Amino acid sequence: MIDNNLEHTTIRPGLTLAGFRVTPAFVAAFGVLLVTVISLFTLPYIGMADNGDFYRIIYSNGLYFDLPDYDSRYFGYFVKQFGIFQYYNENSSMVVSSQSLFIKLAIFINKLFFSKEVFDIRFQAGIYTLLYVTAIYLLIEAVTFKMSFKRGMLVAVLAIFIFGDTGYTSYFSSFFGESVVMVTMIMVFASWLLLYRKRYNDYAMLAILLISTLILTTSKQQNAPVGMVISLLSVPLILIRRDKLFRWITLLSAGLMMFVGIATYLNISKEFVNINQYHAMTRGVLMESENPETALNSFGINEQYAILKSNTYYDQYGTVDVKSEMLQKDFYSRYGFVSILKYYVTHPEQLGSILDTAAESAYKIKPAAMGNYEMSAGKEFRAQSHFFSLYSTLKEKLAPRTFAFILLWMAVTIGVYMPSFVRAVRTRDYRGMQRLLLILATMLVGLSGIVVSIIGAGDADIAKHEFLFTLAFDLITFQVVSSVIGRGMSSRKSMPAAPPALPATDYTTLNRGVGA
């Protein structure tokens, strides 16, 4: 059995050098910081090209495109500087997103230290980088809390390899919401795991869990289920402490997560509902159906709309006017998320097909369509950086591309942690139960990214829509592998006999006077 739940010992891996305590958490955080600084803040600068979505978030936050040939750079080239509105901004908010908090903060710092007229996106990237490094530190602190220094260092190197990948960090130099998703999802995972470990102050970790969940849920409208899932599975946290204050705060926090999740869903604008609804049919139901006319009949839609099969909402020369009253009356009004879900349930062969389609893109950390370099770097259109991207490359090429593998991965992971969960239930170790609950919550959050994508929008822009799953997959897999790396330490700690004296050069001897 791996990673046995030692009763919240205070053993911490670390090595003191010149009076400074070096821990695996510090090494992992510093390594990710170093790689990110090199990739995002030194020439050639790495970022992510605009796919046409940036306008939805930047106009309402006081920014505009400041290049006359900006349109020619869509998908191909990363742009790092934008104009700042100097006078009245008539643009209303197209999307309500917590991402705006980070953009406004970056603009404020930009005005203080750089310019009041030109916004450099590297100020935003700097904010995300600092938050990301903090999240990595907390994650590794939780994962390595009971490991030896050597094993903890192996975990730290693994963390740098996975989470320092530029497939992840290049999002920081863009206006895609994935940046917020990445930082807050790791914060949620780390704070919950630290509650399980009984590491740091419980109230502080609960606050991080709550705030991160709220920001994550409201970062993108498709993340509405996130708050609901975490809300339900975090309720057992009320049992980890006996004081009533903590229990009431935990219960209220769960209720607030649920409320925000529902509110985010209800607040989705009509335009985005139509866009996603259109793709759910044309790039989902119709595309996967061998007989589109029959599929339309099951929704009570005229068979002639079968000509929309495989069309997108943004086609320059579309078959129909996607915003017309006719389409609203005869097409959009005839189906929704629930009816499409019901259709797939009653057509399992199509459901299996589109799930496999989703699985093909479920391991792509960065979309292949967007370039990473500025035009001035002299790279070809849509050229992507390969600097420190071995993990994302291997993951995309080697991961099995079937939904059956995802189900197998879930079953194996749950099976690994189920014995310790059962033991915790029998002994009423309420903290011991939290690890599996966290794993389940992360799995369901990741799956929600797949389900919402395919049922809510078909395969349109599916690689980016499934980002939540690929991050959840990495977090859980990282946790499992780290447990395997650290299991030897757990076994030794359960032995009653005192260990023999060790040479002065051994880590344990070096660390005796540090109070570890």
Image (spheres, helix red, strand yellow):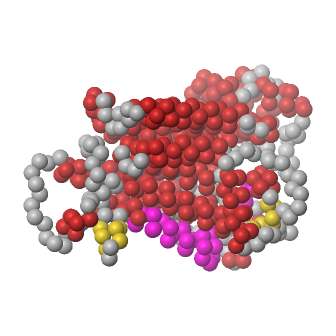
Does residue 411 show up magenta in the picture? no
From the viewer's perspective, is residue 165 above or below residue 98? below
Task: Name the foreground residue: 156 vs 255.
Answer: 255
Q: Quadrant of the N terminus?
A: top left
- The image quadrant of residue 78 is bottom right
Does residue 41 show up magenta in the picture? yes
Q: Quadrant of the C terminus?
A: bottom left
Residue 159 screen position, x and y as percent: 42, 59
From the viewer's perspective, is residue 146 above or below residue 192? below
From the viewer's perspective, is residue 216 above or below residue 28? above
Q: Which residues are magenta?
A: 27-55
- The image quadrant of residue 407 is top left
Residue 233 screen position, x and y as percent: 48, 33
Residue 174 screen position, x and y as percent: 67, 61
Residue 250 appears in the figure: yes
From the viewer's perspective, is residue 392 above or below residue 4? below
- Apparent side of residue 174 relative to residue 83 in the rendered image (left or right): left
Task: Name the foreground residue: 498 vs 245.
Answer: 245
- Apparent side of residue 171 relative to residue 310 in the rendered image (left or right): left
Residue 288 appears in the figure: no
